[in-house]
């Protein structure tokens, strides 16, 4: 039996014995759904939720060797525990908690990798979405292999939904090409302009264009000071918990929050904030929506969710440039900005430095991952901040 299979089974058996929810992802899952290839480690997603990561990490590290001296601290910060099985093979255990991960584990099904070795793996569609999200060169190859091998059985509606949700425009375009090539979609003429650069999509390079907002169904911005909420795509586990607590507090205080609600953490915040009668503002990084997602329609109809866009209708896709423009608009509208996390070297960090240099009140959590922001002058978020008074002082 393959040594990597044995390592994966050893860790999986440990999880099964404790009735933990998990599934195989990564290279081993590719062997089931895509073009089989050599892989150096086994990847699993383990449902830990938020706040229970330490319990799972300690149990695993008591049984298995960590691959780095600070394996526990690294796992709690980056939500992946790097383990070594007893046969010396590497196993990466990702800590799952987001809605996508919860749903992915529910959709996981058993697969026999070898005689007598059955492990649950994520679905082909979920594996494709994860590959698209990471988007390294090998991930592109894996995703194409999945699309080609699965053909008509691939849940393309599920894939396109998540590609649009995360603004993965180029991957969406590429998937549509592959789908048509495989006969999964009718052959239609592709409009090259639809995938042109930002300058050809009507995105204005002038900052003043960003202030001309388009409102869904002729709504208007709610009166009162507003707090911008931003976060990079990847966010350390501790900061996820802190952001959850912050949003629950903002919801109770009735603070008007504005955000692009684009990154996974921002999307989770939107779900929390909409459990309140107070308004929330969603600023798009594209032209105005023709239709609103079904789960958001009640909030829109009740006036609890106001959707705005700084772009013309012909801007139909989210790009890195439109996302940056959108975030600048969000910051301009708000009296202050909260950044849960800005990844080092990211466009988010660049924007934060610009805002601080311009004198914009910017707050973040006291965490090693936010050290650069704090050093640049960001204020620390503390539990006793009176956001209502703080925002009124800035208006």
Image (tube, rainbow, N blue to C red):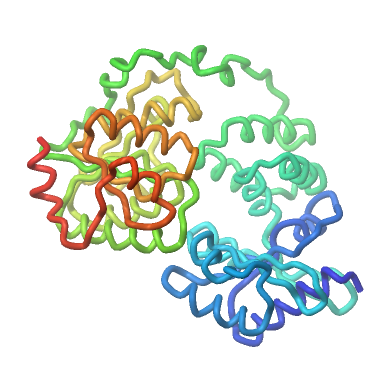
Q: Which quadrant does the C terminus fall into?
A: top left
Left or right: 128 with respect to 49?
right
Tell whether 260 sits left or right of 81: left
**Residue 113 appears left or right of 25:** right
In the rendered image of this protein, does residue 69 appear above or below residue 169?
below
Please name the residue shown 50% across and 66% down the image.
76
| Vertical arrangement, residue 291 with respect to residue 279, above or below | above
Q: Quadrant of residue 393?
A: top left
Give the side of residue 269 with respect to residue 86, left or right. Answer: left
Work out whether residue 300 can be spotted.
no
The location of residue 5, given as percent across then percent down, is: 82, 71
Say which residue appears at 40% left-offset and 45% top-offset. 372
x 61%, y 70%: residue: 69
Q: Nearer the viewer, residue 263 or 67?
A: 67
Q: How many marks?
A: 0
Q: Position of residue 23 (x, y in %)?
A: 66, 68
Image quadrant occupied by the N terminus: bottom right
Splitting the image into 4 quarters, where does residue 182 fall?
A: top right
Q: Residue at x 66, y 51 (%)?
A: 125
Residue 13, how many percent across, how many down? 71, 82
Tell me the quarter of the picture where residue 238 sits.
Answer: bottom left
Residue 288, x across and y down, in percent: 37, 27
């Amino acid at each position: 039996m393959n040594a990597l299979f044995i390592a994966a089974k050893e860790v999986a058996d440990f999880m099964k014995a404790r009735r933990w929810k998990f599934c195989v992802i990564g290279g081993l899952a590719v062997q089931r759904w895509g073009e089989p290839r050599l892989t150096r480690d086994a990847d699993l997603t383990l449902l830990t939720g938020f706040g229970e990561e330490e319990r799972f990490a300690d149990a695993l590290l008591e049984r298995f060797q960590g691959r780095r001296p600070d394996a526990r601290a690294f796992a709690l910060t980056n939500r992946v525990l790097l383990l070594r099985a007893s046969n010396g093979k590497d196993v990466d255990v990702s800590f799952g908690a987001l809605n996508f991960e919860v749903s992915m584990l529910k959709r996981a099904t058993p697969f026999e990798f070898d005689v007598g070795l059955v492990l649950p793996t994520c679905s082909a569609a979920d594996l494709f979405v994860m590959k698209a999200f990471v988007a390294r060169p090998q991930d592109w190859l894996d995703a194409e292999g999945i699309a080609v091998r699965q053909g008509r059985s691939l849940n393309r509606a599920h894939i396109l939904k998540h590609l649009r949700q995360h603004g993965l425009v180029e991957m969406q375009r590429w998937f549509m090409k592959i789908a048509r090539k495989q006969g999964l979609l009718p052959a239609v003429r592709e409009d090259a302009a639809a995938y042109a650069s930002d300058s050809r999509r009507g995105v204005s390079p002038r900052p003043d264009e960003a202030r001309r907002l388009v409102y869904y169904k002729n709504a208007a911005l709610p009166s009162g000071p507003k707090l911008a909420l931003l976060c990079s795509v990847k966010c350390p586990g501790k900061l996820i918990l802190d952001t959850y607590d912050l949003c629950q507090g903002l919801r109770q205080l009735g603070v008007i929050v504005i955000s692009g609600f684009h990154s996974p953490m921002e999307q989770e915040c939107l779900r929390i904030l909409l459990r309140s009668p107070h308004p929330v503002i969603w600023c798009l990084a594209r032209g105005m929506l023709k239709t609103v997602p079904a789960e958001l329609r009640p909030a829109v109809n009740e006036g609890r969710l106001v959707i705005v866009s700084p772009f013309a209708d012909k801007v139909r896709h989210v790009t890195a440039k439109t996302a940056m423009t959108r975030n600048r608009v969000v910051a301009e509208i708000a009296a202050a900005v909260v950044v849960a996390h800005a990844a080092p070297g990211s466009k988010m960090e660049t924007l934060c430095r610009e805002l601080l240099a311009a004198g914009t009140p910017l707050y973040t959590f006291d965490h090693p991952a936010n050290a650069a922001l704090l050093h640049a002058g960001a204020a620390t978020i503390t539990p006793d901040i009176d956001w209502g008074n703080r925002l009124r002082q800035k208006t």
